[in-house]
């Protein structure tokens, strides 16, 4: 909340309804979709003397549901003859798996399906790795409301930065195609920032990219599903609103900073502490 207040009087008024209030862990409903509207107001009221408004979005499990890439990959493996012959039980379970069975990593997907054989984990992980980090990102499904909201921010004047741990050689083309195909803004007012080399560490790459992004203007908000990345972005851009997308993330031990606003998708909503409407007819 401290960061939001620095946006000035309007920001103060806008955020009054949402806080300070209980912390995320104290609230019965930790989600705060109202923040998505607040970011619109911050973009609209951005003082041009402080630079152009910039909003930063991660891609996998932030704007796009990476489970929608993983599930078809695992189903394909389940249909391969040599896999079916070696792991008949796993083939049956993977072919019947749904989006809800998908997890951040293959080991946990298999564990959730009651499969924990180490050789199997390696076999499925190797297959998944080669296909997941590939042009298959072209068919990723976006999170609900994602394209509409990013378009709204762009129309209000924000520069949109897509900052992802994907790498250009394997996924640059499909990233661009999927953004366009799903109706996200893409062109002069947007930047797609990907790793030049897939071997680079995600966080180290994102830290490096922050130096470039800060030259584009004032970062108003950052959107991330990975707590470690979100917190690092928050440290670098202390005035930015931090939005944590609660989808799936790695097993890195970090939690989102207490200043993060949690959302499940990109459908804006009322403030979390809004009092229930009073029916005066009673
Ligand atoms: Mg991500």
Image (cartoon, grey):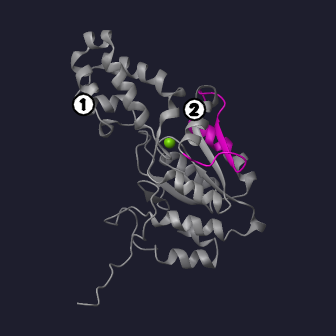
- Residue 107 against residue 81 in the figure, above or below: below
Work out how far the residue at label 2 is from the one at label 1, CA to CA, in angstroms.
30 Å
Q: Nearer the viewer, residue 258 or 224?
A: 224
Q: What is the magenta range?
A: 183-209
Check the picture and name the quadrant holding the C terminus. bottom left
Marked residue nearer the N-terminal end (2 or 1):
1
**Could you classify mark 2 by the number of other residues whose Cα lies within 10 Å: few (under 14), some (14-19), or many (20 or more)?**
some
Q: Residue furthest right?
A: 49
Residue 186 magenta: yes
Instruction: Give left or right: position of 55 versus 128.
Output: right
Q: Is residue 3 visible?
A: no
Does any atom of ligand 1 lie closer than 8 Å to the CB of label 1?
no
Where's residue 182, x and y in %?
53, 44
SS category of the residue bearing label 2: helix
Disc assigned to residue 113: 1
- Residue 189 against residue 88 in the figure, above or below: below
Residue 115 magenta: no
Label 2 belongs to which residue?
174
């Amino acid at each position: 909340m401290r960061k939001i207040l620095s946006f000035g009087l309007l920001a103060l008024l806008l955020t009054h309804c949402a806080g300070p209030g209980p912390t995320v862990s104290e609230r019965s409903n930790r989600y705060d979709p109202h923040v998505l509207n607040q970011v619109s107001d911050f973009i609209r009221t951005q003082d041009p003397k402080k630079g152009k408004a910039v909003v930063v979005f991660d891609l996998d499990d932030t704007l796009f549901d990476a489970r929608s890439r993983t599930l078809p990959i695992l189903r394909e493996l389940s249909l391969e003859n040599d896999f079916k012959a070696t792991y008949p039980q796993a083939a049956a379970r993977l072919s019947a798996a749904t989006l809800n069975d998908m997890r951040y990593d293959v080991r946990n997907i298999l564990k959730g399906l009651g499969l924990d054989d180490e050789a199997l984990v390696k076999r499925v992980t190797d297959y998944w790795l080669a296909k997941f980090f590939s042009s298959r990102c072209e068919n990723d499904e976006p999170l609900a409301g994602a394209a509409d909201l990013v378009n709204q921010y762009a129309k209000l004047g924000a520069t949109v930065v897509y900052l992802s741990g994907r790498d250009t050689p394997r996924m640059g083309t499909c990233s661009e195609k999927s953004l366009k195909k799903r109706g996200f803004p893409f062109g002069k007012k947007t930047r797609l920032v990907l790793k030049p080399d897939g071997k680079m560490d995600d966080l180290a790459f994102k830290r490096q990219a922050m130096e470039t992004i800060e030259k584009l203007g004032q970062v108003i908000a950052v959107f991330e599903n990975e707590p470690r990345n979100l917190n690092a972005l928050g440290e670098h851009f202390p005035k930015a609103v931090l939005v944590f997308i609660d989808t799936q993330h790695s097993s890195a031990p970090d939690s989102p900073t207490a200043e993060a606003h949690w959302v499940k998708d990109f459908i804006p909503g009322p403030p979390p502490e809004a009092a229930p409407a009073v029916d005066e007819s009673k």
